[in-house]
Image: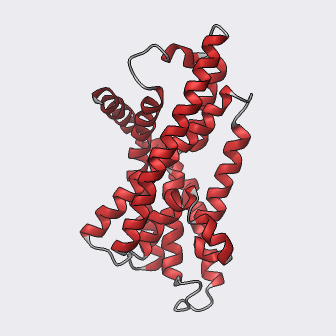
Amino acid sequence: MKKYLFTFKFELMTNLQYIKNLLFSFIVYFMMLFIFINLWKYIYSDPSEIINGYTLNQMIWYVIAAEVLWGTLSGRKLCKEISDDVKNGNIAYNINKPYNYILYRLSLHMGKCFVKFLIWSTLSMLTGYIFLHSFPDLNILSILAILLSAFLALVISTLLITFIGLFSFIIEDSGPFYWVYSKLILVLGTIFPIEYFPLWAQGILKYSPIFVVSYGPSRLFVNFSWLMFTKVVIAQIIYVILAYLLCLLVYKKGVKRLNVNGG
């Protein structure tokens, strides 16, 4: 366990050297937020109007929270790195090393995400306050609970993208799979919350990764309740286990294939 904590700490300290780059990358994110904020202001002709259980302020804060979770992940880069490891044969060098490749990748990427999440979430809170002149009604305990859920969401996202990247053991390029996955998360859980879809679709989405990586933590941020928190965290723990086991299954099958083919 110590080696993974060391990897996390090392990557964290490395990324602290590039804060200016992270601040610059927030500019593109801010432009997206600006578009979405104005879009929802146009949809809500009356700020006090409630659509599908969301007021205007709640809807904007939901989008901000979901965008922070998705934007800080850098999923495309992670998928490409793992896919390249497989295709270039670099992953073969990790087979005999004294660490688990999946946990190594997880701790490495979480170290990258931590600094970006901290900066983007702070700037996003300021951005939201500038436009809305208020914060969600939260206390210290609920904020800590939301941060725990956000952490689990990033862990699950990292594991699922790792799983997609490891598909390069089976197919030539896992990029198209990541493209489909990212667009589903963006449309079905980031731009729109689950309540905006038909009832039959809501039942499906509440059991999908969208619920645990995007909708759940964002919903807690705009309308916190301990009952909802319990449901989200239990689902997230189950998904952490399932996502890790899926990664392990594909990785072991891929390693076996490498061994059979002589690396």
For image coordinates 53% across by 84% down, the residue present is 53
For image coordinates 63% across by 65% down, the residue present is 204
Q: Quarter holding the C terminus?
A: top right
Image colouring: secondary structure
Residue closer to the observer: 161 or 26: 161
Q: Is residue 148 visible?
A: yes
For image coordinates 44% across by 74% down, the residue present is 222
Q: Is residue 5 left or right of residue 64?
A: left
In this rendering, the answer to whether 154 lies above or below 105 is below
Determine the image quadrant of residue 42.
Answer: bottom right
For image coordinates 45% across by 37% down, the residue present is 109
In this rendering, the answer to whether 201 lies above or below 147 is below
Q: Point out the residue furthest to the top here.
A: 262
Residue 231: image location, x then y, percent: 42, 66
Residue 133: image location, x then y, percent: 41, 79
Residue 198: image location, x then y, percent: 68, 76
In this rendering, the answer to whether 42 lies above or below 253 is below
Q: Point out the residue furthest to the left here.
A: 140
Q: Is residue 23 visible?
A: no
Total number of numbered discs in the rendering: 0
Q: Quarter holding the N terminus?
A: top left
In this rendering, the answer to whether 56 lies above or below 100 is below
Residue 46: image location, x then y, percent: 58, 92
Determine the image quadrant of residue 206.
Answer: bottom right
